[in-house]
Image (cartoon, helix red, strand yellow):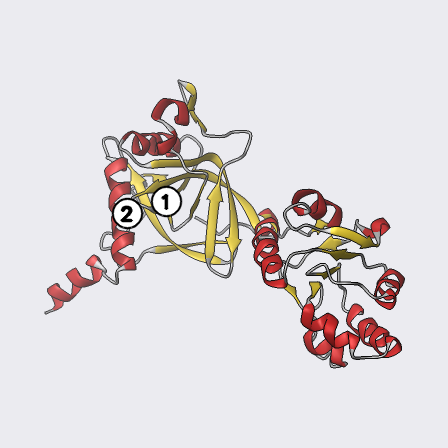
Amino acid sequence: MNPIPPDAVSLNTGISLARLLEVKGEVLALEVMTGEDSLERTVANPDVSSPGLGLAGYTDGFPRGRIQVFGQTEMSYLATLSPEVASRRLEQVLQHDIPALVVTRGLQIPAYFSERAAASGIPVFRTHLITGDFYRLIKPYLEDVLAPTTTVHGSLADVYGVGLLFMGESGIGKSETVLDLVERGHRFVADDLVFVSRRGNDVLLGRGHELQGFHMEIRGIGFVDVASMFGTKATRQQKRVEVVVSLEAWDDAAEYDRTGLNRGVETILGVDLPRVTIPLVPGKNLTVISEVIAMNQLLAYAGLDPSARFQERILQ
């Protein structure tokens, strides 16, 4: 199985300030102080920071593209400067592609602050939240909405707490395998089209399409409503993708791993996942094999590798 092609990846070019205000304005208690005509500006960086040394005039290495938050410390420092000096320092900060300024604690905003931001076309928001609470509420949302995302043709299930992503050609049996796993008490996440997003450097989360819900297509039957048939406990909204199970038709000319020492790798959004290839022949019990794959992964998390231990016994 080849890695997901780069053109299948959406790097989420950003979210407009207007959309941020619409979705999170009430939760963040945001009010627009200036720049209502600049709300089309885009936030593309999930990181949020305070200007820090930038207000002291040192802007080398200043982060670009971040919402800048002015709390009690920043506003108190600016108050120690003359309006002219404070305005120049603020101007230096605003040169770093800043989408918006947020003043916390409901603090008073000096006239020069609003004027300088307006001259740069940068909106100013104010919230009554303290700085720590504002960070806590906005960062998870930005990390979610701006996370690199791709779509994968496959089926995703939670098996013993391990996220198994079944991949393979259309009609190979991915949906049927997941349906059988659900019948055995495991949990269904997504079928056919799996949205995968990266959180941090090495965590992939998979979910289904909102319109599809917890429906899956079984050839010869049609659509099956997993939640209605097996109950909500048989479903999950999302799950970390931990192992790729590649289903393929048996090929007499192919060489398949028989020791477990040469497990493959599947790369999705720059994250390497273990890949187990299962060649299909009539009568093979994919459900039990899938459970074994999940349990093997749990052993790997505990630092145990049955294949390596067996090899050591043979070599002794």
Neighbourhood count class around disc 2 (C-alpha, 10 Å): few under 14, some 14–19, many 20 upward: some
Instruction: Assign a secondary structure to mark 2.
Output: helix
Q: Give the alpha-carbon distance from disc 1 to disc 2, as whole Å.
A: 9 Å
Question: Mark 1 = which residue?
Answer: 164
Is residue 66 something one can see in this rendering?
Answer: no
Quadrant in which residue 289 is drawn: top left
Residue at image x 72%, y 59%? 106
Q: Could you tell whether 104 is left or right of 300 in the image?
A: right
The amino acid marked with disc number 2 is: Ile
Residue at image x 85%, y 76%? 88
Q: Are marks 1 and 2 in contact (CB under 8 Å)?
A: yes
Q: Could you tell whether 179 is left or right of 41 in the image?
A: left
Quadrant in which residue 111 is drawn: bottom right
The amino acid marked with disc number 1 is: Leu
Residue 207, percent from left and from top: 48, 41
Q: Earlier in the sequence, mark 1 or mark 2?
A: 1
Question: Mark 2 = which residue?
Answer: 293
Quarter placement of the C terminus? bottom left
Among all residues in the image, which is located at the extreme top?
221
Residue at image x 74%, y 56%? 126
Q: Is residue 11 above or below residue 104?
A: above
Q: Is residue 98 above or below residue 298?
A: below
Give the number of the disc on residue 40: none
Is residue 20 something one can see in this rendering?
Answer: yes
Residue 228, percent from left and from top: 40, 23
Q: Is residue 115 above or below residue 144?
A: below
